[in-house]
Image (cartoon, grey):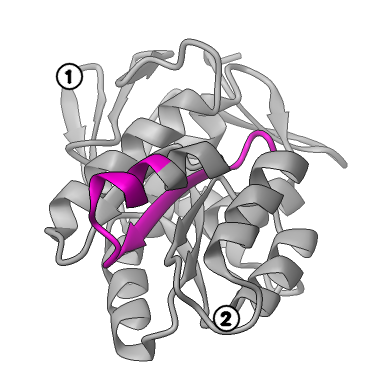
């Protein structure tokens, strides 16, 4: 999952981003509404964590823009505006969820995971295929009931591949979904991550390279 954090308090924004990255969620940070609109125009986000009272384009306008232009992107408003009227207004603007400050970080993560499930039709809370089980809430992976210990990035890549349900995922899509805006698209980081992931999952391989296209998760061939 890739998230955009729109928060004008830099310390809080970076703290949220750091916490999400530890949960295998790629996170970009912007501090005003105008920059948020620029990032949305060039990146494919699964969810936006949006403060309402931000410089430049107001958070309410950003939310309405996302609802209109990016229907598969979910919005969770994370704001000090906590009255019932504030919440009603937020949902009317197109927000998918609303969490008032102060908040508990584990709750934010659970809400983001729940929103992620809604971006795809009938996505199960736990993914299972080819003898591999991936639980995004517990951040655990098993192969044939054996616990597989993965790095955060390996877990994120596996999550993207398994969500493709047997479809081929390009290297560009993996970079888009599992890394943030600081990733260098010209490095071999994806190839190295895939190689390490294959080793950790063991034999027979369940991640297959489709030459010139990308990678596919599925039964051994």
Which residue in the rendered view is the most extreme toward the bottom? 10
Within 10 Å of disc 2 (Cα), the crowding (few <14, some 14-19, many 20+) is: many
**Where 146 falls versus 111 (above or below)?**
above
Question: Circle 2 sits in a helix, a strand or a loop, which is it?
Answer: loop
Q: Is residue 77 magenta?
A: yes
Residue 124 percent coordinates (x, y): 37, 15
Relative placement, left or right, of 16 versus 207 is left
Mark 1 secondary-structure assignment: loop
User: Magenta region: which residues?
Assistant: 71-88
Q: Quadrant of residue 20?
A: bottom left
Q: Residue at x 57, y 81 (%)?
A: 32
| Residue closer to the observer: 98 or 139 | 98
Instruction: Tell me if residue 125 is in the magenta stretch.
Output: no
The residue that mark 2 highlights is 32
Which of the two discs, 2 and 1, labels the residue nearer the N terminus? 2
Which is nearer the eye, 154 or 118? Answer: 118
Depicted 9 relative to depicted 170: above or below:
below
Residue 108 to residue 146: above or below: below
Q: Going 30% across and 70% down the picture, which residue do you hit?
A: 16
Reading the image, the residue beneath label 1 is 145
In the shown orientation, is residue 53 left or right of residue 112?
Answer: right
């Amino acid at each position: 999952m890739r998230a955009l954090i729109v928060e004008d308090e830099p310390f809080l924004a970076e703290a949220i981003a750091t916490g999400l990255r530890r949960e295998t969620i790629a996170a970009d940070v912007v501090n005003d509404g105008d920059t948020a609109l620029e990032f949305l125009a060039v990146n494919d986000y699964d969810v936006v964590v949006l403060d309402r009272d931000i410089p430049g384009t107001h958070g309410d306008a950003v939310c309405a823009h996302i609802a209109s232009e990016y229907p598969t992107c979910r919005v969770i408003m994370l704001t000090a505006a906590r009255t019932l009227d504030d919440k009603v207004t937020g949902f009317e603007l197109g927000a998918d969820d609303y969490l008032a400050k102060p908040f508990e970080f584990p709750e934010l993560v659970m809400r983001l995971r729940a929103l992620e499930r809604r971006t795809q039709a009938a996505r199960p809370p736990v993914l299972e295929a080819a003898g591999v089980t991936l639980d995004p809430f517990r951040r655990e992976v098993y192969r044939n009931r054996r616990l597989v210990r993965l790095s955060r990035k390996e877990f994120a890549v596996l999550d993207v591949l398994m969500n493709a349900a047997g479809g081929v995922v390009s290297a560009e899509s993996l970079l888009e979904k599992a890394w943030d805006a600081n990733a260098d698209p010209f490095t071999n980081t994806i190839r190295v991550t895939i190689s390490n992931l294959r080793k950790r999952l063991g034999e027979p391989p369940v991640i297959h390279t489709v030459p010139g296209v990308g990678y596919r998760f599925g039964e051994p061939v």
